[in-house]
Amino acid sequence: MAGNISRGERLQIMLNREELAALDDWRFRKRMPSRASAIREILRRGLAAEGFDLADSDTQSKEFGVIEDSAD
């Protein structure tokens, strides 16, 4: 991996307790050094995946979650 990468933009996200636990569990299983690196890796994998749907422009942010709601 390239060293000393300059990151010019900051992205802030809000996660609920269950989403944060899922992120941290994945991070520790993969031995990622930080939450930020885990999120970047998840984004990289997601963007590299084939067959993902593009979001409808009318979709609201609250409609996207990390884990499925057990009530569904």
Image (spheres, rainbow, N blue to C red):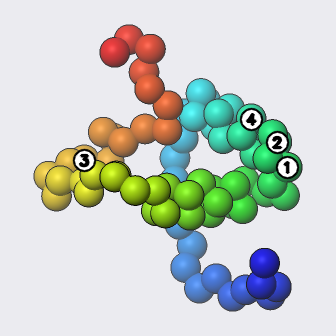
Considering the numbered disc 3 on the image, is that residue within a helix, a strand or a loop? loop
Q: Secondary structure at mark 1?
A: loop
Q: Position of residue 53 (x, y in %)?
A: 28, 52
Label 3 vs label 2: CA separation? 30 Å
Q: Residue sitting at 49 percent across and 38 percent down?
A: 66
Is there CB contact under 8 Å for labels 2 and 4? yes
Q: Amino acid at mark 1?
A: Arg
Which residue type does callout 2 highlight?
Answer: Phe
Q: Residues within 10 Å of mark 1 (few under 14, many from 20)?
A: few
**Comparing marks 3 and 1, which lies closer to the viewer?**
1
Report which quarter residue 42 is drawn in. bottom right
Residue 31's disc number: 1
Say which residue label 3 marks. Answer: 60
Q: Label 4 vs label 3: CA separation?
A: 27 Å
* Disc 1/disc 4 C-alpha distance (Å): 10 Å
Neighbour class for label 4 at 10 Å: few (<14), some, many (≥20)?
Answer: few
Is residue 28 visible to the viewer in this orientation of the structure? Answer: yes
Point 34% across, 52% down: residue: 52
Residue identifier under label 2: 28
N-terminal label among 1 and 4: 4
Q: Is residue 31 left or right of residue 71?
A: right
Q: Is the C-beta separation of discs 1 and 2 under 8 Å? A: yes
Q: Earlier in the sequence, mark 3 or mark 2?
A: 2
